[in-house]
Image (cartoon, rainbow, N blue to C red):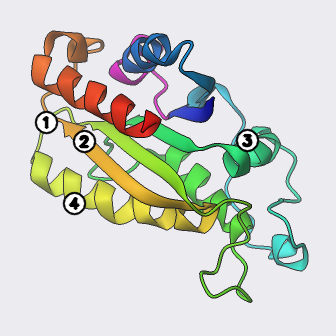
């Protein structure tokens, strides 16, 4: 059974990220082992840029917070799904800190700069844009999710749902729900 890590990067408990995480979790029930990590409810600190992780040969971080505890889960999963709003044309601060902390997977002695245990994992990003140009946000998401390659995520799929500022409004958008269903199928394939 595949291991899927779902990461939500919103603080809105009734927002689109939580709503879709619940729906996707139900879809994956019995088909995958699912771990859900709500960044907004966790202690994920900024990277210290101390390079202590570079003196180790397995992904690790000297900080002791909820991200550090999640490192083995990130390393061993088959796929990760990030559900997040777009804030000011970029990732929310909590997700940026999460991404920065994957620096703990980087190994400059490796040809691919990664000490991830697995380097064949899938990463899907499903983002919610309240207002603004979906194509611009899609380009931003695509450019940034590639940074997760250090943690072994080498195959990507992204979707940006536009006009999605109202909490839970994704459930009223058949095209965006279809995109979510396609992502679930892709993660399981």
Image point (79%, 46%), residue name: 72
Whole-number angstrom distance, CA of label 3 to CA of label 2: 24 Å
Q: Is residue 85 visible?
A: no
Pointer 2 and pointer 1: residues touching (CB < 8 Å)?
A: no
The numbered mark at residue 73 is: 3
Label 4 crowd bin: few (<14), some (14–19), many (20+), radius 10 Å: few
Q: Which residue is mark 1?
A: 131
Which residue in the protein does label 4 denote?
Answer: 139
Name the residue located 28 percent from the left edge and 25 percent from the top edge. 181
* Mark 2 or mark 4, earlier in chain: 4
Q: Secondary structure at mark 3?
A: helix
**The magenta stretch spans residue 10:** yes
Reading the image, the residue beneath label 2 is: 159
The label on residue 93 is none
187 lies left or right of 60: left
Q: Position of residue 161 (x, y in %)?
A: 19, 33
Quarter-wise, where is residue 73 in the image? top right
Q: Secondary structure at mark 2?
A: strand
Q: Is residue 99 left or right of residue 49?
A: left
Using the image, determine if residue 139 lies above or below residue 52.
Answer: above
């Amino acid at each position: 059974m595949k291991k899927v890590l779902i990461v939500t990067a919103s603080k809105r408990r009734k927002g689109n990220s939580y709503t879709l995480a619940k729906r996707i979790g139900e879809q994956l029930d019995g088909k995958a082992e699912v771990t859900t990590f709500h960044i907004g409810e966790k202690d994920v600190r900024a990277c210290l840029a101390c390079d202590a992780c570079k003196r180790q040969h397995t992904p690790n971080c000297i900080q002791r917070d909820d991200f550090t505890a999640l490192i083995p889960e990130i390393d061993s999963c088959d796929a990760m799904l990030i559900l997040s709003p777009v804030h000011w044309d970029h990732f929310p601060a909590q997700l940026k800190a999460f991404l920065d902390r994957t620096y703990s997977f980087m190994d400059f002695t490796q040809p691919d700069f990664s000490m991830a245990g697995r380097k064949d994992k899938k990463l899907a990003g499903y983002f919610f844009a309240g207002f603004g140009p979906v194509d611009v946000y899609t380009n931003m998401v695509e450019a940034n999710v590639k940074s997760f390659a250090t943690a072994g995520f080498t195959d990507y799929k992204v979707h940006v749902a536009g006009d999605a500022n109202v909490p839970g409004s994704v459930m009223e958008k058949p095209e965006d729900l279809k995109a979510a269903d396609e992502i679930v199928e892709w993660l399981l394939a």
